[in-house]
Amino acid sequence: MESNKDEALRSLSIAQRHRDSGNLTSARKFCQKSISLFETPEAQKFLAAIEREIESGSAGPSNSTSASGAEAHPSASSAKQRHVPSSSTSGAGAANGSAGQEKVKRDFTPEQHSVVKRVRACKVTDYYEILSVKKDCEEVEIKKAYRKLALALHPDKNGAPGADEAFKMVSKAFQVLSDPQKRAAFDSHGSDPESRFGGMSSARASPAGFAGSPFGGGGFESEISPEDLFNMFFGGSGGGFGGPVFSASFGPGGFRTTRVGGGFGDMPRQRRRDQQAEQPRAGSAFIQLLPILVLFFFSFLSALPKLFSAPEIPDPRFSFIPTMQYNIQRTTHGYNVNYYVNQREFSKHPIADEIARIGETSLGPGLSKFEKGIEKIYVQNLYDQCQRGMDRKHQRKEAEVGFFGIRTDWEKVRQIDQEKIEECDRLREMGLLRRE
C-alpha cells in the first residue's frame, strides 16, 4: 500500500546501517520487512547483495550496492548514517581480516564520560531523573533537557563506554514524557507505559485500534529508534528541527501513531494551525447554508406586506346572461360588454361606494380593475368560439371536396366559405381580429 511507503523506506535505512556495522542478519531482517511493507527495486537489489555477502562470509558493504540500495531513494538518503573512519577500518581489517567485526575505539572527554555514568546510574524507567527534570515541569523544559543530553551522548560525538545505552535511555525518556498520554500513564503507575506488563499499554492509552489492520488484536510493536528520533529532532530525515514528527506502529491494540514535538515553541504554532483548520470548516458550513438563508430572507420580505395590510376584498360576482340572481345590467367602459350583477351584493361592495363618490361617467381604480377582468374573460370566450366555428367550416369543406375534388359540388363549397361566424365578426368589430 502507498501509505506504508515511508515506513518501508525507514526500515530500508535501518537495514543499511546494520549492514554498515557488519550485522548482516539484522540488515536482512529489516530489508525483508521493508519489502513486505512496500516493495521497491532498491530493496530487492539490496536484499540480494546482503544474501551474497552472507553466503560469501563478507561483512563489509560494497559501494555499488550502497548506491543502488536505500541511499538511492531521496527519502532514505536523508537519514544520517554513522561511518567508521577509513584509516581505522583498514587497520582493523589488516589485523583480523574483516573490517566490520572490529569495534573502533572512539575519543571522549571526562565531562562526556561523567554524563554517561550519571545516566547509566539511573533506573531505566526513572525518566525524570534521566532527563534531570522535575515531575511537574513543562514540555518545553523536557525538550530542552533532551536536546542537551542528546547532543552530549550521541554516539557520533561521545565515544565513552556505555554512551550508546545512555543515548537510548535518554531517547526513551523523551518519547514517554513528550507524549501526554504516555506521561499520564507513567505518572500514575511508574512503569513503562508501552510495556505489555506495565500499568497502561500504548494500545489501551489510545481510544481504539485501527479496524482495517491485520494486527488489530496483537502483533509486534515497532517504535521509532533513538537514532531516528535524534535525526528527526535535530534536522535529519524527519523534516528538520522545529517541525512535527510522527511515528506509526502496530501494537497490542492495533495501529497507533505517535507525535513527537518538533522543537521549542512548537505547541503555540500547532494550536494556531488547529485554529486555522477549524475556520475554513466553519466557513464552508456557512457557505452551504447561505442559499437557504437567502431564500428564507426573501420569502419573509415578500410576506411582510400581507402581514401588515388588510385582506383584499374579492371582486363582485357577475354573469353575461341575465338571471333571477344577476338582475342588474351594466356595461364596461372599454369594449362595451354587457354584464349582470346581483343588486344586493354589488351595492355593499366598495366599488359601489367608489361609483357613488365619483359618478358613473368616471372610471375609478376599483371599477377599472373589475371591468378589465370582465372584458378579458369575454374576449377569451369569443376567441374560443370563433376558433371552434372556423374548425367546423374547414371540416365541412374537406368533406365536400372529397378525394382530389372528384364529383365536388363547388357551389356548396362556396356557400360554406361565405357562412358567417358571429363570434369572429364580433372580434372584428372590436378590432381584435383581422378582417378577411
Image: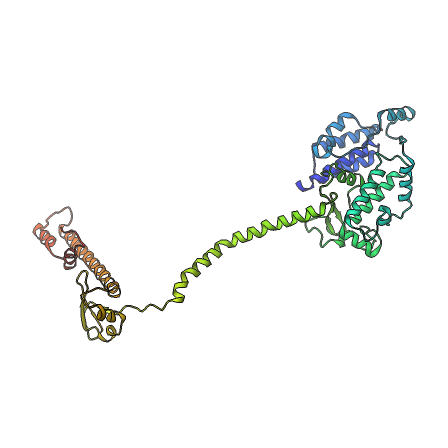
Q: Is residue 68 toward the left or the right of residue 113 in the image?
A: left
Q: Is residue 396 toward the left or the right of residue 17 in the image?
A: left
Image quarter of residue 306? bottom left
Q: Residue at x 79, y 33 (%)?
A: 81
Most extreme residue toward the front is 357
Q: Which percent across, then down, holds residue 257?
A: 72, 47
Q: Is residue 38 toward the left or the right of residue 16 in the image?
A: left
Confirm whether residue 278 shows in the render.
yes
Task: Establish if 222 lies above or below 181.
Answer: above
Nearest the eye: 295 or 207: 295
Q: Colour scheme of this structure image?
A: rainbow
Confirm whether residue 35 shows in the render.
no
Q: Residue at x 85, y 34 (%)?
A: 157
Task: Establish if 224 lies above or below 328.
Answer: above
Q: Which percent across, then down, holds residue 106?
A: 89, 32
Q: Which percent across, then down, holds residue 319?
A: 22, 68
Nearest the eye: 67 or 58: 67
Task: Establish if 290 lies above or below 306.
Answer: above
Q: Which percent across, then down, holds residue 133?
A: 84, 48
